[in-house]
Amino acid sequence: MNAASGTVNLKAAMFLERALIRFRDLHPDVTAQQILFFLAVAIAPGISQNELHERTGICDSTASRTAALLTHLGNRHTPGLDLVRMEEDPNDRRRKTLELTAKGRRLMNDVAADLI
């Protein structure tokens, strides 16, 4: 909203609406936190879960659950979305790095195309 005139930037609102619909179409219960997590991985491929925690403020245990939902793993109630791949760092087995899968890159490209 423009504070001086009281108007809303409709173009920005429409972009956000389209982006959220794309995520919702993947799974109707996708959360803003999961979208934030996905976008952080898209911005910083190879980011670790700890770095993701620092970047987004998502606590470690929630980051682990969110990573599982965005990978092929999912959880016992929800199948994984296969948007993010998690790999063990060969130099530090405790460190897990995250990057987008081909499906995740397609989604990010679709969201970016909506900007145009």
Image: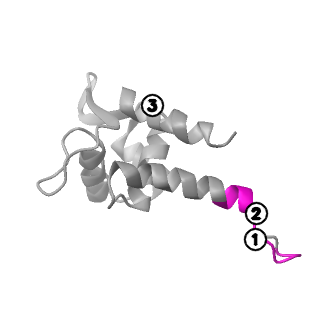
Mark with earlier residue (1, 2): 1
- For marks 1 and 2, give the CA distance: 6 Å
Task: Provide the secondary structure element on which disc 1 rests.
Answer: loop
| Amino acid type shown at disc 1 | Met
Residue 88: assigned label:
none
Asked if residue 56 can be seen in this view, the reply is yes
Q: Are marks 1 and 2 in contact (CB under 8 Å)?
A: yes
Residue that carries the numbered disc 1 in the rendered image: 1
Task: Provide the secondary structure element on which disc 3 rests.
Answer: helix
Mark with earlier residue (2, 3): 2
57 vs 99, nearest the viewer: 99
Asked if residue 54 can be seen in this view, the reply is no
Task: Provide the secondary structure element on which disc 2 rests.
Answer: loop
Q: Residue at x 32, y 53 (%)?
A: 27
| Prevailing SS of the magenta stretch | loop
| Amino acid type shown at disc 3 | Arg
Residue that carries the numbered disc 2 in the rendered image: 9
Q: How many other residues sit within 10 Å of disc 2, few (<14), some (14-19) or many (≥20)?
A: few
